[in-house]
Image: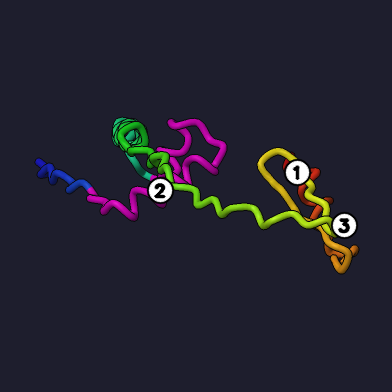
């Protein structure tokens, strides 16, 4: 009579299991087909998939808490007869005779998109 030798199950570490799961997901094969090709028990793949799903569901999502910061408001400069005060929403700009027109144009273009 022949003797029966029980084959020892192959143990997979976490990283090897992740690689095998990734290979399964990208294979396009059914679970049964992939398990037969890889020599993995169908129940083992099912267990791995269940553990992976539980791991994904238990991962916490980091949520940033809102933080209120005080806003420093400096007093507006005094307005002279030679200046014009432009206000748009919460922004104000004092424009004088020597104001760089190109810079003013660029600043106003930005403010238009914000207001």
Residue at image coords 30%, 30%: 43
Which residue occupies the foreground of this view, 1 or 49? 49
Q: For the residue carrying disc 1, how many other residues have a C-alpha within 10 Å: few (<14), some (14-19), or many (20+)?
A: few
- Disc 2/disc 3 C-alpha distance (Å): 60 Å
Q: Residues within 10 Å of mark 2 (few under 14, many from 20)?
A: some
Q: 38 or 85, which is in the foreground?
A: 85
Query: Which disc number belongs to residue 87?
Result: 1
What residue lies at 87% left-to-right and 57% top-to-bottom?
Answer: 105
The span shown in magenta is 10-38
Check the picture and name the quadrant holding the N terminus. Answer: top left
Name the one closer to the observer, 86 or 67.
Answer: 86
Name which of mark 1 and mark 3 comes first in the sequence: 1
Q: How many discs appear?
A: 3
**Sequence-wise first label, 2 or 3:** 2
Disc 2 is placed on an element classified as helix
Would residue 71 appear left or right of 12 to someone viewing this image? right
Residue 74: percent from left, percent from top: 56, 54
Q: Which mark is residue 20?
A: 2
Work out whether 105 lies above or below 100. above
In x, y percent, where is residue 65? 38, 40
- Local secondary structure at mark 1: strand
Prevailing secondary structure class for the magenta stretch in the rendered image: helix
Looking at the rendered image, the disc whose residue lies closer to the viewer, 2 or 3, is: 3
Q: Pick the quarter of the image with the C terminus.
A: top right
Q: Nearer the viewer, mark 1 or mark 2?
A: 1
**Cα distance in 3D space between marks 1 and 3:** 15 Å
- The numbered dot on residue 58 is none
Provide the residue designation for mark 3.
Answer: 105
Colouring of the image: rainbow
Which quadrant holds residue 99? bottom right
User: Would you place residue 97 above or below residue 28 in this image?
Assistant: below
């Amino acid at each position: 009579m022949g003797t029966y030798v029980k084959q020892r199950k192959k143990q997979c570490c976490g990283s090897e299991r992740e690689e095998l799961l990734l290979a399964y997901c990208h294979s396009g094969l059914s679970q049964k087909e992939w398990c037969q090709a890889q020599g993995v028990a169908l129940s083992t793949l099912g267990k791995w998939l269940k553990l992976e799903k539980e791991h994904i569901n238990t991962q916490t999502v980091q949520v940033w808490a809102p933080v209120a910061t005080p806003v420093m408001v400096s007093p507006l400069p005094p307005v002279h007869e030679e200046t014009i005060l432009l206000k748009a929403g919460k922004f104000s700009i004092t424009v004088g005779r020597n104001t760089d027109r190109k810079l003013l144009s660029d600043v106003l273009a930005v403010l238009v998109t914000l207001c």
